[in-house]
Amino acid sequence: MPGLLQRFLPREEGFFDLFAKQASNIHVGAEALHKMLSHYTGVPEQVQIVKAIEHEGDEITHALFTKLNQTFITPFDREDIYELCSRLDDVIDLIDAAASRFVLYRVDSVRTGPSISSKCLFPPPRKLN
């Protein structure tokens, strides 16, 4: 009976690919912010790069929400998918906001503290089982 039921109510597994894509995008954004703080030249251009990465993150978030609204049976609770997606989007939004503040407040130079602190945004990768 479970095989017959699974044919009528297929589960959508594409969410995990989009979560991985969003996580990768966050990592790229964190690296761009760290690069901006480590080599503090051409800051407005580097902020635009971070902003483009954030825009790509917004597109991934939109794709996740669209998929969530179009899927009948999800891999786990809808509320949890929504919460995870929102939190992932918040991370890349805050990276963009931090980068934009350097231009907004016209910061001319950066001490070593922010550069060292930005390293905590991307810990060494590890494989999850």
Image (spheres, rainbow, N blue to C red):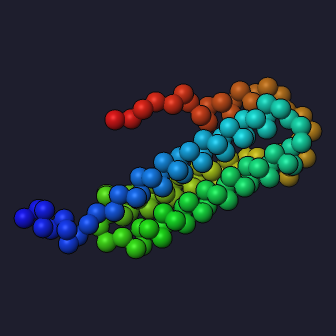
- Name the side, left or right, on which 121 lies relative to 20: right
Query: Is the N terminus in the top left, top right, bottom left or bottom right quadrant?
Result: bottom left
- Residue 70 percent across, percent down from the top left: 40, 74
- Name the side, left or right, on which 36 lies relative to 124: right
- Total numbered labels placed on residues in the image: 0
Image vertical order of residue 77 relative to residue 37, above or below: below
Name which quarter of the figure residue 114 lies in: top right
- Residue 44 percent across, percent down from the top left: 87, 49
Is residue 4 or residue 15 the one in the foreground? 4
Name which quarter of the figure residue 79 lies in: bottom left
Which residue reaches farthest left? 1
Is residue 55 or residue 81 the one in the foreground? 55
Q: At 72% from the left edge and 41% from the top edge, which residue is drawn? A: 32
Is residue 47 or residue 110 the one in the foreground? 47
Is residue 128 or residue 14 the one in the foreground? 14
Is residue 97 at all visible to an observer of this figure? no
Is residue 63 at all visible to an observer of this figure? yes
Q: At 85% from the left edge and 52% from the top edge, which residue is drawn? A: 104
Q: At 48% from the left edge and 70% from the top edge, which residue is drawn? A: 66
Image vertical order of residue 110 relative to residue 1, above or below: above
Q: At 80% from the left edge and 52% from the top edge, which residue is drawn? A: 48
- Residue 118 percent across, percent down from the top left: 68, 33
Image vertical order of residue 95 relative to residue 70, above or below: above
Name which quarter of the figure residue 5 lies in: bottom left
Query: Is the C terminus in the top left, top right, bottom left or bottom right quadrant?
Result: top left
- Residue 95 percent across, percent down from the top left: 68, 47
